[in-house]
Image (tube, rainbow, N blue to C red):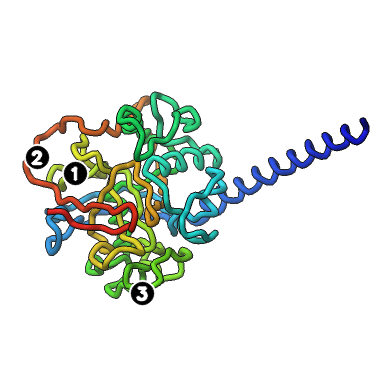
Amino acid sequence: MEDNVNSKKLIAVAGGLALACSVFAQSNIAEKISSDMVAVEGGTFQMGSRDNENNETPVHEVKINDFSILNTEVTQTQYKAVIGVNYSHFKGAERPVEEVSWYDAIVFCNKLSAMAGLTPVYSLDGETDPDKWGDIPRMDSADGDKARWNTITWNTSADGYRLPTEAEWEYAAIGGLYGSPENLYSGSNIISDVAWNADNPDGETHDVATKAPNALGLFDMSGNVWEWVWDWYGNYHLADNDNPLGAKADVTGRKMRRGGSINSDAVFCRNANRASSVPELRGVDLGFRVVRSVIVAADSENEEPVVAPAANTVPEEEDDDPLLTVEYDEEDGLDVIID
């Protein structure tokens, strides 16, 4: 009898220690991520490219507010500390997390925000706790589940972690006010200096921050893994020029991803390159990094959240120009341009 009591006490103590260690690890990760955020001074820049694919045109001036961005892609250590699991194919504590969908990235952002004592940015059906959102959609999920998750809203007055917009991502990749817009890749015109891409024969992801950074001190903006951003895929000539949030309504069912990967030819690793995938897709070279807004006191007490429209809704403005489709091969992680 006494042995049973002692065993239960030991189990309780062990459980308590495990919980304490988990909380400590989460606290450390939140502090580490916070310390690795790089302040990006806002400004205007020329977004897009006139020399390459038609979905990168027209080149247009875009204004970006101040924000901060993680200096690396989210690592497997960071992801597991926040989410509790790591489904990455190429295992390594300091390798970027992959096999994550756009939905997975959104969940990570809110959980990290709560862990850090910040206001979560995203909500679904008015709820900011992802544990109450239901199952994360997968490739084989019902269309209704995906449509519901596609109505996730962005509270623009929240100070938590989020995905960058496509415009913020490109501005940061160039190097903000301090970079060279003439660079094809993030920090250089020589891709091997800054990117792990298809030119590297091993075909695996690598530890973050092992190539040269760009002018802002950001690593792997080109190559290693593709990075999910907030925006739905849309044509530039319909976009706003002041802190654009992407297409006002989705007609493709696809979310933007940027930067290229270990499986990408150099053309896909350019700062201006645009690619997209369905938000439920997970791949061996699909990851993300996080940003935070610099919150300025609003003029009004109640600021309306920005809404990510449901897939396949009617756009506010008709667009007859075809989008260039860059198809993602889920098995090989390769990109193929579809005419």
Q: Which residue is mark 1?
A: 234
Residue sitting at x 36%, y 66% = 215
**Observer-nearest residue: 144 or 131?**
144
Earlier sequence position, callout 3 versus callout 1 = 3
Q: Position of residue 139 (x, y in %)?
A: 34, 40
Inspect the image, locate mark 3, and give the three-letter code of the amino acid beneath it.
Asp
Q: Is residue 293 left or right of residue 4?
A: left
Q: Position of residue 127 (x, y in %)?
A: 44, 26
Q: Position of residue 107 (x, y in %)?
A: 45, 39
Question: Where is the N terminus found, in terms of image quarters?
Answer: top right
Q: Which residue is mark 2?
A: 319
Which numbered circle lies on residue 193?
Answer: 3
Q: Is residue 105 above or below residue 313?
A: below
Report, in whole angstroms, how far the alpha carbon at label 2 lies from the one at label 1.
9 Å
Inspect the image, locate mark 2, and give the three-letter code of the amino acid beneath it.
Asp
Residue sitting at x 66%, y 46% = 24
Answer whether residue 31 is visible to the viewer in this image: yes
Mark 2: few/some/many CA within 10 Å (<14, 14-19, 20+): few
Residue sitting at x 28%, y 47% = 277
Inspect the image, locate mark 1, and give the three-letter code of the amino acid beneath it.
Gly
Quarter of image, res 20:
top right
Which numbered circle lies on residue 111?
Answer: none
